[in-house]
Amino acid sequence: MPLTADVKAELIAGRDPRPSARVAELTAILRFAGGLHAIAGRVAVEAEVDSEALARRVARELVDLYGVRPELAHVQGTSGRPGTTYAVRVIEGGETLARQTGLLDQRRRQVRGLPNRLTTGARHDLAAIWRGAFLAAGSLSDPGRSAALEIACPSGEAAMALVGAAHRIGIAAKAREVRGLPRVVVREGDAIRAVLHEMGARRAAQEWEQLRQRREVRAGVNRLVNFDDANLRRSAQAAVAACARVERALEILGDTVPDHLRAAGELRLAHRDASLDELGHHADPPLTKDAVAGRIRRLLAMADKKAETEGLPDTESAVPAAAKE
């Protein structure tokens, strides 16, 4: 996804200098991109990410914040997960790192969500959690009816922790399951722009908003065109039906039609596409549109009554099938 790659590239290029935000981002990456593993009886911390730049960023932060030197490795893709990924592993001192980041609690139990001290932190720390989660497992789709910013989560508890962090900074996010896998989704356009801005992808937020506005304008124009086409089609069908009924009415009534009603009917036939208001202006003397409508209505009613009395087809019978749709 080009949009996803652009957002991640911008996030990787930037950096929040505040230590608490760096810790929050790194912890989220470790939680959403991997977690804890047992290797040779020891606890290892591992994150598997989709770019070398992100892998090197994670490794650098591990060195700077915790003084551990991780291993970097290429992971060849499989049929279920194509493409090369990059693994950042800490085996020596992995358990200590897991405790320091809050991935393990004091009883050596794995924390399935996120450390409480992070999800109740300051606004910039909550934004850093989202930044780390998106870098690890996020995606952004194009603006449109199905637009969404999604993050795949390792557990339902992690999803709920991410939703809670979003709500604390005023962003509407929801947890849901897709094919049994928990995800956090932001769908509303303004909320997507807001979360991009909070994470630090300011340029991507602006570009996404501009793209959304262009698509909304285009969609609005298309709706208006379709609406106008439908109105024109309905108007044309109504004009055909009205003229067909008037012709039939004059035929049924013959010489018995009153002069003022005949004049209204002939006016309708002489200006088939005109509105009632326009017909009134063509009349001599001019009439209001209500007067024209009333005379045509009486003409049709008189003809239908005579047709019923004499057993003749009424005015509706003259309307073409296409004009009745």
Image (cartoon, helix red, strand yellow):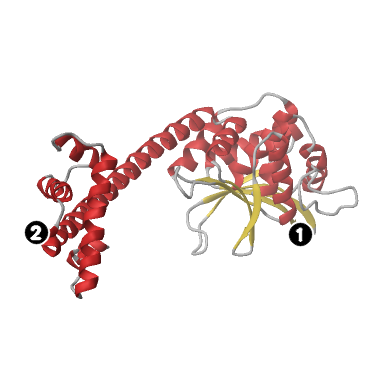
Which secondary structure, mark 2?
A: helix
- Residue at image mark 1: 40
Q: What type is the residue that disc 1 sits on?
A: Ala
Residue at the right extreme, as displayed: 107
Is residue 222 shown above or below 206?
below
Residue 181, how many percent across, how many down? 63, 60
Is residue 216 shown above or below 299?
above
Dot 1 alpha-carbon crowd within 10 angstroms: few under 14, some 14 to 19, many 20 or more: few
State the residue in front, 38 or 12. 12
Q: CA distance from mark 1 to mark 2?
A: 109 Å
Which secondary structure, mark 1?
A: loop
Q: Is residue 83 toward the left or the right of residue 25 in the image? A: left
Q: Is residue 184 toward the left or the right of residue 10 in the image? A: right
The answer to whether the residues at label 1 and label 2 have Cβ atoms under 8 Å apart is no
Dot 2 alpha-carbon crowd within 10 angstroms: few under 14, some 14 to 19, many 20 or more: few
State the residue in front, 194 or 223. 223
Residue 150, how many percent across, how many down? 57, 48
Q: How many marks?
A: 2
* Residue 57 visible in the snapshot: yes
State the residue in front, 200 or 163. 163
Query: Which quarter of the picture shows residue 69?
Result: top right
Residue 103, how many percent across, how many down? 78, 47
Is residue 9 shown above or below 159?
above
* Residue pictured at 33% horizontal, 42% vertical: 224
Residue 148, how many percent across, how many down? 53, 46
- Residue at image mark 2: 255
* Residue pictured at 61% horizontal, 45% vertical: 136
Which mark identifies residue 205? none
Q: What type is the residue that disc 2 sits on?
A: Asp
Residue at the top extreme, as displayed: 17
